[in-house]
Image: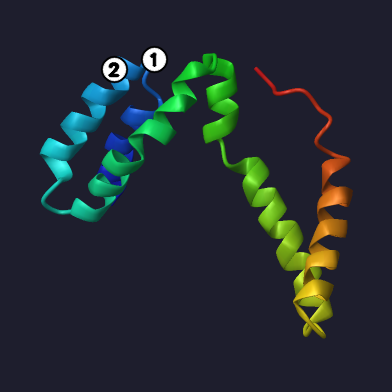
Amino acid sequence: MKAFMANLKCVYKAATINAAEIALDELDAKWGDKYPMVIQFWRTKWPTLSTYFKYPEYVRKAIYTTNAVEAVHRQFRKLTKIKGGFANENSLLKLLYAGILKASERWTHPVQN
């Protein structure tokens, strides 16, 4: 799986959309038999996924770096673990919304590098 992920990284770290499409073709040729559903997903969603290449490289780096997403998930787990059960779905959504507001206070820092 590590080798597959390294090859997949060549797709989303490509400098241009054309280079990404070539990398996706190479990924398919190498791994298509072993991971057909993943390749099919990327091919099916390519029109949406490829819009990513409209952004400058520094923005793309911020998008594919998952630290911000992981931080939000950590915040959600922290909030829901403390509470335990919820009376209804609405009470959970209110708690998560409040957590996002609190977390967003730290999102005012510029993207590094």
Q: In the drawing, does residue 10 fall left or right of residue 40? A: right
Q: Position of residue 91 (x, y in %)?
A: 84, 74
The reply to whether discs 1 and 2 touch (Cβ–Cβ < 8 Å) is yes
Q: Please name the residue that numbered disc 1 is placed on.
A: 15
* SS for callout 2: helix
What residue do we see at 71% from left, 66% from top? 77
Q: In the image, what residue type sits under mark 1? A: Ala
CA separation, marks 1 and 2? 7 Å
Residue 110 in percent (x, y) is at 77, 23
101 displayed left or right of 65: right
Near mark 2 (Cα within 10 A), the count class, few <14, some 14-19 or many ≥20, is some
**Callout 1: SS:** loop
Q: Nearer the viewer, residue 70 or 101?
A: 101
Q: Residue 89: x, y in percent?
A: 75, 76
Q: Which residue is mark 2?
A: 19
Q: Amino acid at mark 2?
A: Ala
- Please name the colour scheme applied to the rendered image: rainbow
Vertical placement of 82 versus 79: above or below?
below
Quarter of the rendering containing residue 9:
top left
Q: Is residue 110 visible?
A: yes
